[in-house]
Every structure is written in structure tokens, then in C-alpha cells.
């Protein structure tokens, strides 16, 4: 079984298709959703979008990026997990990514030729530059020295220790090198205090293949999901 299949949304999990190699489904295109940091495949955004795609008769695959081991999560591990799930390069893939999943989607677009377009929701560009200052220098130093930092995991509803390798791994991915020109839609709340909207504005500078939609919302985007779905439908030409 492909890594991460056991983390698919239940709407797909109950389908016999997950018990067969997805590369033999005969699909013409692939749609994949990546949840955010310390989140999970049953998040509100994931379930909302899965329901909307289901209504449009389009399968949306949702991986569990925690893999049962959030403590050793890294960006590299997420990239490897998704790459192992992707179909062959002749099948076009669309990735929707939320927050850290959005950052992951951007790197997959850079690395994987079958990824033809991406949609990012409050993408976590400049993730460390926003998160580490909030933790404070002393906490970060203690984390580095001890090896682990308790992080509240929203899907598990408890604190889980995260290894410091998460930090050193992300540092190996300079966002300035993200330059593959594929259609990219960014949806970001102007009141986001986790990943400020300026991060998306900066990312879109000198990347004319990107489109930024600024929304009256915060990092959760919970109050604008119907609007987000309309933007996604227009971007993907669903129902046209």
C-alpha cells in the first residue's frame, strides 16, 4: 500500500479504490489536499473541500501527513510521502495545500513535473521567520539543546514533542529557488496573525504566474470557505 493511504479522508477510505494501485485507476487528472502543520486530514477545511469536490463528482485525496509520528515530522518527509503517492508523470496533478501544506505544495510543484497547478490557503511562506520569534530565543535554544519541544497538535488535541530536526530540515529549502512557472492560486486572510498576508504578497512579487486573492479572514479562513470554493471552482474551471 502506498505510504499515507491509511490517512485518506473517510469518503475515499471506504472506497475499494484505495486497495488498488492508484496508478491503474485510469484517471485523467489527480486532485490532492495537504493539511497544515499540527493539523490532520479531518480538519474543517479538508472536510469542507472534500464534500464540495464530492458534489462535483471529483475525487479529492487527502493524505495524513502526520504518519502516526508527528514528533519526527519534517518538510523532507512530507515531500517524500506525497511523491510516493503521486501518479506517473503523464497524469496531471493539482495540489491544494493549507498553511504548511501550502508550502509543501509549492515545493512539490518545483520538484514534480506531473504537478501542473497548485492552490494554497494561507501558505506558510517564511514559516520559521514567523514562528521562531513568537517562541522566543530562550525557548528555541532549549529546544535545540533538549532535542524536543512540546507543540499543541490540533487534530490530536494534545501536546506532542516535536524534534528539532524539523527546524534544521526546513532551513535547507530556500524559497527564493521556487521558480517553476505553473498556475498558482494563493488565498490568504488579511487578518492572519500566524502567517501574515505580507508573506504571500512578497512571494507573488516577480512571479507573474501567481494570483493572490486577499480575503477578510484570519489564518483559519473558516468564515470564507464558500468564497474560497468559488475561487477554486473558477481557477480549476469546475462546472464549465
Image (cartoon, grey):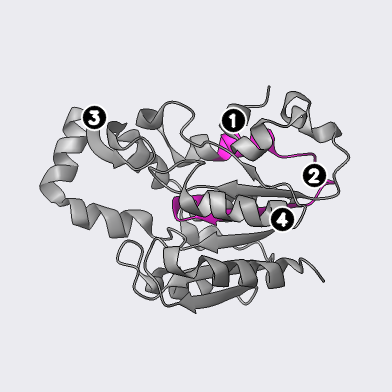
Position of residue 216 relative to residue 160, above or below, is: below
Q: Secondary structure at mark 4?
A: helix
Q: Quadrant of the rendered structure where residue 236 is?
A: bottom right
Sequence-first tag of 4 and 2: 4
Q: Secondary structure at mark 1?
A: loop
Mark closer to the observer (3, 4): 4
What's the distance in space between the residues labelled 1 and 3, CA to CA? 26 Å
Sequence-first tag of 3 and 2: 2
Q: Which residue is mark 3?
A: 147
Residue 18 numbered tag: none
Quadrant in the picture for the C terminus? bottom right
Sequence-first tag of 1 and 4: 1
What's the distance in space between the residues labelled 4 and 2, CA to CA? 27 Å
Q: Secondary structure at mark 3?
A: loop
Sequence-first tag of 2 and 1: 1
What's the distance in space between the residues labelled 1 and 4, CA to CA? 24 Å
Whether residue 89 sits left or right of residue 186 in the image: it is: right
- Say if the magenta span includes residue 49: no
What's the distance in space between the residues labelled 3 and 2, CA to CA? 38 Å
Asked whether 168 or 55 is in front, the reply is 55
Residue at image location 60% in from the left, 63% down from the top: 179
Position of residue 197 relative to residue 87, above or below, is: below
Q: Secondary structure at mark 2?
A: loop
Position of residue 91 relative to residue 65, above or below, is: below
Q: Which residue is mark 1?
A: 4
C-beta proximity under 8 Å, tags 3 and 2: no
Residue 55 numbered tag: 4
Q: Quadrant of the rendered structure where residue 122 is?
A: bottom left
Q: Which residue is mark 2?
A: 89
Magenta highlight range: 79-101
Amino acid at each position: 500500500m502506498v505510504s499515507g493511504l491509511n490517512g485518506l479522508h473517510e469518503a475515499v477510505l471506504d472506497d475499494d479504490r484505495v486497495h488498488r494501485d492508484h496508478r491503474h485507476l485510469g484517471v485523467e487528472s489527480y486532485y490532492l489536499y495537504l493539511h497544515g502543520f499540527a493539523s490532520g486530514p479531518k480538519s474543517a477545511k479538508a472536510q469542507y473541500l472534500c464534500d464540495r469536490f464530492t458534489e462535483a463528482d471529483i475525487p479529492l485525496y487527502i493524505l495524513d501527513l502526520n504518519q502516526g509520528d508527528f514528533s519526527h515530522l519534517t518538510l523532507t518527509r512530507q515531500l517524500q510521502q506525497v511523491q510516493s503517492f503521486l501518479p506517473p508523470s503523464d497524469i496531471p496533478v493539482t495540489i491544494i495545500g493549507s498553511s504548511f501544506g501550502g508550502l509543501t505544495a509549492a515545493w512539490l510543484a518545483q520538484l514534480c513535473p506531473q504537478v501542473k497547478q497548485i492552490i494554497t490557503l494561507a501558505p506558510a511562506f517564511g514559516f520559521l521567520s514567523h514562528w521562531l520569534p513568537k517562541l522566543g530565543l530562550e525557548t528555541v535554544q532549549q529546544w535545540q539543546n533538549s532535542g524536543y519541544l512540546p507543540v499543541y497538535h490540533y487534530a490530536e488535541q494534545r501536546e506532542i514533542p516535536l524534534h528539532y530536526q524539523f527546524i534544521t530540515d526546513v532551513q535547507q529549502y530556500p524559497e527564493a529557488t521556487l521558480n517553476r512557472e505553473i498556475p498558482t492560486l494563493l488565498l490568504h486572510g488579511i487578518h492572519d496573525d500566524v502567517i501574515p498576508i505580507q508573506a504571500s504578497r512578497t512571494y507573488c512579487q516577480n512571479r507573474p504566474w501567481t494570483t493572490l486573492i486577499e480575503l477578510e479572514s484570519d489564518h483559519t479562513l473558516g468564515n470564507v470557505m464558500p468564497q474560497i470554493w468559488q475561487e477554486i471552482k473558477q481557477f480549476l474551471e469546475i462546472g464549465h
